[in-house]
Image: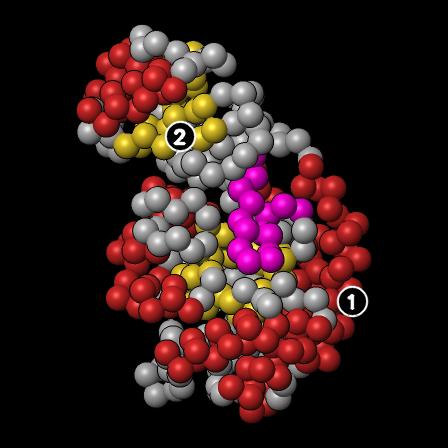
């Protein structure tokens, strides 16, 4: 449920509501709009619901107490109607601009990373990606350079000015990864690793949460809810394909998830056509489709010599193919930009607006 404070509610009224929520063993998350404050009440309510609604409704400064109908609360549009905008160094994700995360699947060497980073930066990438700790299906394939790769990524950030996103696989890697990276990626295999979600929820870095390859949209948003309810509001969702009966593609890119997510949640949505298709020649059309469907951007794998890549060479774009994708993507994005401003079919009229975050 959430408590909508009256326009003229004082600081003391707001604090009174929050301390009452705490005294009931629940957690308050407040969201400051332009006119009002909305306070979400999260935790296990159980049979106390009606009593709690009655008590909160009677507190000074409270206008209404409303149920959030969906199982995800803090990530829902109902609670937070405005888009979340994630800002990291010079990059802004979710404000209607085109986010392009590009770089190698794995960081293989300083030279390979720098060559890729220089080229994608020169051709419009806004964020540099590169795997340091790699979740590989086989224990006998390249597992990533680990901390050495994190150092190269930090050097590449200095070189290009691009913020860096890289995967963190375990809770005990969070500290070291956040020391070097600007955005922490949680991979498809870890989408429901709740101890990892809680751990990345406690750090002051945005998190890109990839969709589990067997996860429904609701399970995905519940995973995002773990991160946000742990204290980190800066979550970016990444559709990277789900497993279906189709085998020509590595996964099936769920394009409808893009507008669906914009309807259900305020979090930014990125598509990853590299892992979604597994085939280099399918990356460009699916990147264009993702952006046309309203995605806030794309993540693509790029390698100077994909045939020599230590992981995911088949789906990696060459430097030239990245350039060509960008020259098509930028005008498509300019055409569909207005989609972001579309009114939502059933947007709740909370009368809040403006600043995001809780
Ligand atoms: C990746 O982005 O490097 C990756 C491993 O992706 P996913 O978790 O989507 O397979
Ligand atoms: Mn990969």
Which of the two discs, 2 and 1, labels the residue nearer the N terminus? 2
Specify start and end residues of the magenta stretch as a single range: 82-96
- Does 19 sit above or below residue 280? above
Near-viewer residue (306 or 145): 145
Number of dots carrying numbers? 2
Q: Which residue is mark 1?
A: 327
Prevalent SS, magenta region:
loop
Q: Which residue is mark 2?
A: 30
SS category of the residue bearing label 1: helix
The image quarter containing residue 18 is: top left
How many neighbours does mark 2 have within 10 angstroms: few (below 14), some (14-19), or many (20 or more)? many
Near-viewer residue (350 or 23): 23
Label 2 and label 1: CA atoms lie apart by 42 Å
Q: Quadrant of the C terminus?
A: top left
Q: Report the mark closest to the observer, 2 or 1.
A: 2
Q: Quadrant of the N terminus?
A: top left
Give the color scheme: rainbow, by chain, secondary structure or one colour. Answer: secondary structure
**Picture coordinates of residue 114, whole percent (x, y):** 58, 82
- Does 281 sit above or below residue 61? below
Residue 309 left/right relative to 73: right
**Picture coordinates of residue 49, whole percent (x, y):** 26, 20
């Amino acid at each position: 449920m959430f408590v909508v404070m009256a326009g003229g509610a004082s600081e003391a009224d707001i604090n009174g509501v929050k301390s009452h929520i705490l005294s009931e063993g629940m957690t308050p998350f407040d969201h400051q709009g332009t006119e009002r404050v909305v306070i979400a009440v999260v935790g296990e309510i159980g049979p106390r619901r009606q009593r709690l609604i009655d008590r909160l409704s009677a507190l000074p400064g409270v206008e209404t107490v409303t149920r959030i109908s969906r199982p995800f609360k803090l990530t829902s549009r109902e609670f937070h109607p405005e888009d979340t905008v994630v800002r990291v160094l010079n990059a802004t994700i979710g404000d209607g601009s085109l986010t392009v995360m590009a770089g190698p699947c794995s960081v293989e060497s300083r030279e390979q990373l720098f060559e890729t980073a220089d080229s994608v930066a020169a051709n419009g990438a806004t964020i540099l990606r590169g795997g340091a700790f790699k979740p590989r299906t086989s224990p006998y394939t390249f597992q990533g350079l680990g901390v050495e790769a994190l150092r190269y990524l930090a050097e590449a950030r200095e070189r290009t000015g691009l913020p860096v996103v890289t995967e963190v696989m375990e809770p005990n890697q969070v500290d070291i990864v956040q020391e070097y990276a600007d955005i922490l990626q949680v991979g498809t295999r870890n989408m429901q690793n709740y101890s990892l979600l809680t751990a990345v929820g406690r750090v002051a870095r945005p998190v890109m949460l990839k969709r589990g390859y067997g996860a429904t949209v609701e399970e995905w948003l519940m995973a995002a809810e773990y991160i946000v309810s742990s204290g980190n509001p800066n979550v970016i969702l990444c559709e990277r394909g789900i497993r279906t009966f189709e085998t020509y593609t590595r996964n099936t890119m769920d394009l409808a998830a893009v507008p669906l997510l914009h309807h259900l949640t305020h979090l930014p949505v990125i598509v990853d056509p590299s892992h979604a298709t597994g085939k280099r020649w399918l990356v460009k059309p699916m990147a264009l489709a993702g952006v046309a469907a309203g995605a806030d951007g794309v993540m693509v794998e790029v390698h100077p010599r994909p045939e020599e890549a230590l992981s995911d060479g088949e789906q990696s774009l060459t430097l030239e193919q990245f350039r060509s994708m960008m020259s098509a993507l930028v005008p498509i994005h300019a055409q569909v930009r207005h989609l972001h401003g579309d009114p939502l079919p059933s947007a709740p009229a909370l009368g809040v607006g403006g600043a995001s975050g809780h």
